[in-house]
Amino acid sequence: MIKKSTAIILFLSFFFVFPLIIEAEGKTYHVGATDLHVRSEPSLNGQILGKLQAGDQVQVFDEAYGWYKTFYNGKEAWIASQFLMVEEQERAATNDSLNDVSITATGVRIRSGPGTNYPIIGFTTIGESFSVVDTEDQWIKVDLKNGKIGWIAGWLTNHQSTTYIPEEPSAQATSDTEQSVEQTATTTTVSNEQNLNGFNIVLDPGHGGMDPGAIGLGGIFEKDVIMEVLSEIASELRQAGATVLLTRSNDSYVDHATRLRISHAYQTHAFISLHFNASPIVSANGISTHYFGPDSKELAYEMQSSLSQHVTMRDRGVRSSNFYVLRNNQNKALLLEMGFITNPHDLLTIRTSDYQDNLAEGITKGLLAYFK
Ligand SMILES: [Zn+2]
């Protein structure tokens, strides 16, 4: 559920500087494996709390028995340390030295210059590493090992000075022309394949941190239930070939402007905000897809149609809704209300692996139906 009290939350956020300081004391690592388990204890016997994907960032606070301690969905959690790579602290200060970067997303393009308006001269594979020759804004000039150089978007690598959230999105998509160059190129690449190769999907898990979202039966928080389904959706999309970007990957507060900045900084084909619904009427139930504006309408209908075929929940249909992350989004954008956490049947269903698998497949097929 989307709250209308954004202003209050923004105001409150000024008083939440303290948790950010604590977080900063952890050391930042990058995940170097796919489907990396997060466990409740520093042991393979620990309960699996969730999965991380290559390129995800993790704050590490402690170490025991070869495991690193972090926090996942607000709980203490442990990750096998051999799959975590430390960020190189010196990098920002030594741009001219030969450091390596490794690619943290699938299908990342190599371009002839530092921007999406430059021609594509090649592709990379996830985990591939390159020597850094230079950096400019959010772009990294790399040695292609064949006597040539190329440029790679820094936010799709483990490069420290160009993290996950590009600081100056306008540098990537300053005009319609640049955007259309990128999208034409992508469409050409994928037109003959039955998958989402070359498609950039931003998943936006709603709420987080001090914003719990709706409160469901038994006091369960919407923000936590969303994280239970997130990894399955991200992993299904990645298996279909999509590059998946997350606006949050842990229980942290991310404001709406930042969510949009991530959507806009990237050549995003679809932005999908994930939510669960709530109602004082306990019998209210079902799944719905929301959009704002004509650009996203057809995608919304394809998505809801696919969801209703895959998920055994009441089909509440498609709605035009004036939500901030939809209204102000320059990309095609949907908001999914994936069931009611105030309805006993929906809540039980939501927490089954069958539902989570079907939901992930429904979302993936919905995107395929629209983009193919
Ligand atoms: Zn919500």
Image: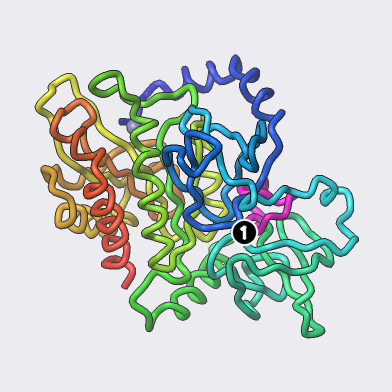
**Front-most of 63 and 247?**
63
Confirm whether residue 158 shows in the render: yes
Q: Quadrant of the N terminus?
A: top left
Q: Residue at x 22, y 50 (%)?
A: 354
Q: Which residue is mark 1?
A: 156
Secondary structure under tag 1 reads: helix
Q: Residue at x 34, y 34 (%)?
A: 225
Compared across the picture, whether 172 is left or right of 331 comes to: right
Image vertical order of residue 107 relative to residue 322, above or below: below
Q: Position of residue 119 (x, y in %)?
A: 64, 77
Task: Determine if the C-beta at disc 1 is less than 8 A from ligand 1.
Answer: no
- Residue stretch rendered in magenta on the structure: 155-173
Q: Residue at x 72, y 69 (%)?
A: 151
**Of the residues shown, which amino acid type is indicated by label 1?**
Leu
Confirm whether residue 169 shows in the render: no
Compared across the picture, whether 102 is left or right of 190 comes to: right
70 drawn magenta: no
Image vertical order of residue 182 relative to residue 324, above or below: below
Image vertical order of residue 158 relative to residue 17, above or below: below
160 drawn magenta: yes
